[in-house]
Amino acid sequence: MPISNSEESLLSEQFDPDYEQLAQVEAKQRRIVLHVYDDESKEFTSLTTYHGMVRIYNSNTWPSLIFWCLVVVTCVTLFMIHSSILLHFYLSLPTFLQETVRVDNGTPFPAITICQRPSSPSLSEFIT
């Protein structure tokens, strides 16, 4: 039974020592990268005040990891919803204006009332 080119290249890769060394080097590089991420994560979680990340990173079991991931995702989602509502309210430029009209027939016409209640009692002597 003849061997095709693809099968021959597959067999040569399996028995080629250079291919095995290359695979080992690539695996080692991946482990180094993951180790760097692990070290960076450990340092970040030791410095941050974002407690959810610390809980996720220090989780020892799958259920606790899933629980803390759900808690963090829920909190971030609620924060984003609340922030968008506040931003939408701010951008609508709300104003509060209360206008009260009182008719006072006992005051002579040119009289103008600037402030009915002065801010301090000592100012009331100067105004009235």
Image (cartoon, rainbow, N blue to C red):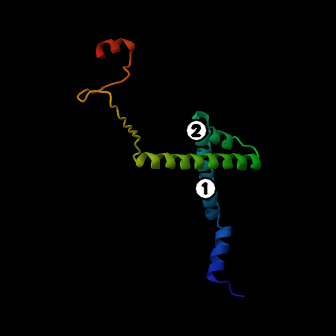
Looking at this view, is 110 or 60 the one in front? Answer: 110
Q: For the point 58% across and 41% down, which residue is it?
A: 40
Which mark is in front, 1 or 2? 2
Q: Which residue is mark 2?
A: 44
CA–CA distance in space, label 1 to label 2:
28 Å
Q: Residue at x 63, y 50 (%)?
A: 31
Quadrant of the image containing the N terminus: bottom right
- The residue shown at (63%, 56%) is 27
Q: Secondary structure at mark 1?
A: helix
- What residue does disc 1 label? 25
Dot 1 surroundings within 10 Å: few (below 14), some, or many (20 or more)?
few
Where, by quadrant of the figure, is residue 39 drawn? top right
Q: Please name the residue shown 58% across and 38% down the image.
A: 44
In the rendered structure, the answer to whether residue 39 lies left or right of residue 105 reads right
Residue 77: image location, x then y, percent: 59, 50
Q: Is residue 36 above or below residue 10?
A: above
Instruction: Tell me the amino acid under the disc marked 1.
Output: Val
Compared to residue 85, the image places residue 125 above or below, namely above
Left or right: where 123 falls relative to 74: left
Mark number, residue 11: none
Q: Check the image and report above or below for 8 versus 125.
A: below
Residue type for callout 2: Phe
User: For the residue labelled by badge 2, is the local secondary structure a helix, a strand or a loop?
Assistant: helix
> Viewer-proximal residue, 96 or 121?
121
Who is closer to the viewer here, 124 or 7?
124
